[in-house]
Structures are given as structure tokens and as C-alpha cells.
Image (cartoon, rainbow, N blue to C red):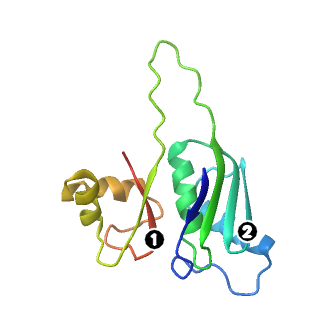
Amino acid sequence: MGLGSFLKNVGEKIFGGGEKPEEQAKKVRDHVAKYGFDLSGLTFTVADDKVTVQGEAKNWDEKGKIYVAAGNVQGIDGVNDQMTVRPAPAQTAAPVAPVVQPKYHTVEGGDTLSKIAKEVYGDVNAYNRIFEANKPMLSDPDKIYPGQVLVIPQ
């Protein structure tokens, strides 16, 4: 949880200019919702080019993707992550896996998913792990841009 930085002049353009913060918050929420995430327990607010997302996310995977989707918007330079995660249903006799919070990578000029995979995993062919972790925000592994923030799975 906390404030994460994003590049303000990159990302999907969803603002037309002159919107009030409430209108911007609705547009960011609608933008994130188009990816099919469960936003029923979340609220979005915008102030000073920063989005605050509060409430309970469905799981860690969605929490990370909601964070990234909200920040990869042109005109937003930060996401204040105030999300918690719904507790997993009680399991009987099964060991509880440790909670691993998502890691993020900001794309730089010349980056490819293969290059990032080589840096993170030591294997260029592991690019598909990163691609899959960022669906549905990414539709093609070759379509990333400098300043974009990606979820890096463990």
C-alpha cells in the first residue's frame, strides 16, 4: 500500500480536458472496469493528478492489475493504493500459501517483454509470464511503451 509513481504524459488517453476531479475519478473507474475486474468494493478519487483507490480487492492478482490499470492513464502521475484484499475462504487441512505482493516494472525505451524476462527471470522465453500477468491490459506482447507500468509475477 502507498503511493506509486507513474509518468503523467503516457498511457491511455481517457480525459478530454477540463473535467472536475469527480468526473476524472469516474473515468478512471470506468477505464479500469473495462478490463472486467470486480470493483464492487472499491472507490476511486482523483486529486492533484493522483488516483486514490480504496476498499477491498477480490484477490492479490486483481489488486495489482487494478493498481497498474489506474496508473497507466495519461494525466495521472500517481496511484495511492489504499486497497486491502479479501480474505481467502477458510480451507481445511490444506497448507496456506504465503502471500506474495506483486512487483512492478516501469518500461524504459528499448525494453521488450523478452528483455524484461531476461532481467527478472534469467530467461528471455519467460516473457509470456509477464504478458499473461498483464492481460487484459496488454493485448499483444509487442505493444508496450516507455513509462508503462507492468505487473511482474513471481
Mark closest to the chain's N terminus, 2 or 1: 2
Q: Where is residue 3 shown, x and y percent of the image?
A: 61, 59
Examine the rendering and report whether any part of residue 112 can be seen. yes
Q: Is 68 in front, or is 80?
A: 80
Please, what is the three-letter code of the amino acid marked with disc 2? Val
Question: For residue 16, which quarter of the picture?
Answer: bottom right
Count numbered badges in the picture.
2
* Residue displayed at 56% across by 49% down: 63
* Residue displayed at 68% across by 57% down: 53
* Residue displayed at 35% across by 56% down: 130
Cα–Cα span, label 2 and label 1: 19 Å
Q: Where is residue 51 shown, x and y percent of the image?
A: 67, 65
Q: In the image, 97: left or right of 30?
A: left
Pointer 2 local density, CA inside 10 Å: few below 14, some 14–19, many at least 20: many
Question: For residue 97, which quarter of the picture?
Answer: top left
Q: In the image, 90: left or right of 96?
A: right
Residue 84 is labelled as none
Q: In which quarter of the image is the C terminus?
A: top left
Please, what is the three-letter code of the amino acid marked with disc 1? Gln
Q: In the image, 74: left or right of 50?
A: left
Q: Name the residue under label 2.
A: 46
Query: Considering the numbered disc 2 on the image, is that residue within a helix, a strand or a loop?
Result: strand
Q: Is 67 in front, or is 37?
A: 67
Q: Name the residue under label 1.
A: 148
Asked if residue 31 is positioned above or below residue 130 in the image, the reply reads below
Asked if residue 43 is positioned above or below residue 23 in the image, the reply reads above
